[in-house]
Image (cartoon, rainbow, N blue to C red):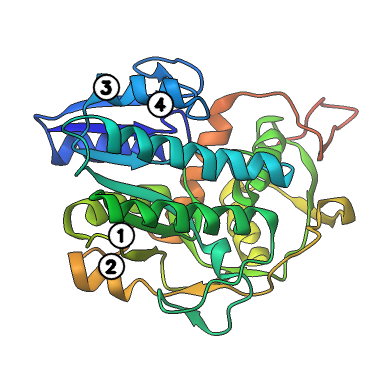
Amino acid sequence: MNILITGAAGFLAGPLYREARRLWQACRLVRTDLAAGPGIAACDLLDAGEARALVRRARPDLVFHLAGTARPLPPAQLWTAHVTATLNLLEALRRTPGCGAARVVVSGSSAEYGQARGTATERTPADPVTDYGRSKHAQTLAALSGRHFGLGIMVARIFNVSGPGIPEHLAPGAFARQIAAIARAAGSAGTVLTGNLAAQRDYLDVRDVARALAAVARRGRTGEVYNVCSGRTVAMKELLDVLIAASRCRIKIVRDPSRWRPVDVPHLAGSHAKLTASSGWLPRVPLKKSLADTLAYHLAQGRQVPEGADVLRSPKRGLAKMD
């Protein structure tokens, strides 16, 4: 069996790689991203020729398409990153002998639901309210069109994610990075700058996401969308409080208007009943452990104090111990 993972340098890909190795031990696994890295081949999926060369080399029976971005980029860049790249990949699969029936798991986003009321299921109409959400829903529609050519397309609609490796442009990573900088400054106190803490989100650990992606690949039905979520919401303030408690530091929270999003959905909850019914998948990692591991990851990075983490130094002892 040949497996291809795109976006292999990203946050989700590491745990997915380990899960794939565990489940398909005899597989040949090819990983690719825009830039080469250890065990990762370079491929620009915006270049149709490179996409075709990648597929000819990998000859995948199964594809996990994770390539994309969650950064606040201009709409045109979001569109090309999600829609153009996906179309190039699917066209390469369709035109490569032996790959036209590959199973393809595409990473979607809960942002496709927009301001859905109540608990979002796969039957909830998509109504994205952000440029990111619109580009991801366009990607979903583009991907699902591939089933008409024989490809086994499935979309894993992923809600908010936490856990080790989370990048700093996502809220748990931004919080953890600032807190870690304060905690590393032995005996320090400081402030953490935040955006809107009243919003409620459905968070799932990245390792549970990896298991869910594998479950979709193994048990999912072609042409279907599957929510990947915990089924529970948490206020951003509570999430931050858990991280602060894990750090054992005294931290002041300061709301920074510049960190507020132009469009911020107040509440978004999901149901994973469809995925559970089809595969037996259930979340395993408690949120507190996921956040503790998030903080531990950023503590281990050993980075300098970032912008937004205001560390207060003791004039007598340098950095005052906080425990």
Residue found farthest to the left: 26
Pointer 3 residue: 56
C-beta proximity under 8 Å, tags 1 and 4: no
Q: Earlier in the sequence, mark 4 or mark 2?
A: 4
Q: Earlier in the sequence, mark 2 or mark 3?
A: 3
Nearer-the-camera pick, 115 or 233: 115
Q: Is residue 9 left or right of residue 5?
A: right
**Residue type marked 1:** Arg
**Residue type marked 3:** Arg
Mark 1: few/some/many CA within 10 Å (<14, 14-19, 20+)? few
**Quadrant (top left/top right/bottom left/bottom right) for the C terminus:** top right
The numbered mark at residue 284 is 1
C-beta proximity under 8 Å, tags 4 and 2: no
Q: Is residue 187 left or right of residue 106?
A: right
Pointer 2 residue: 275
Q: Earlier in the sequence, mark 1 or mark 4?
A: 4
The numbered mark at residue 51 is 4
Q: Nearer the viewer, mark 1 or mark 3?
A: 3
Q: Is residue 289 above or below residue 273?
A: above
Nearer-the-camera pick, 297 or 261: 261
**Residue type marked 2:** Leu
Q: Residue at x 41, y 79 (%)?
A: 123
Residue found farthest to the bottom: 118
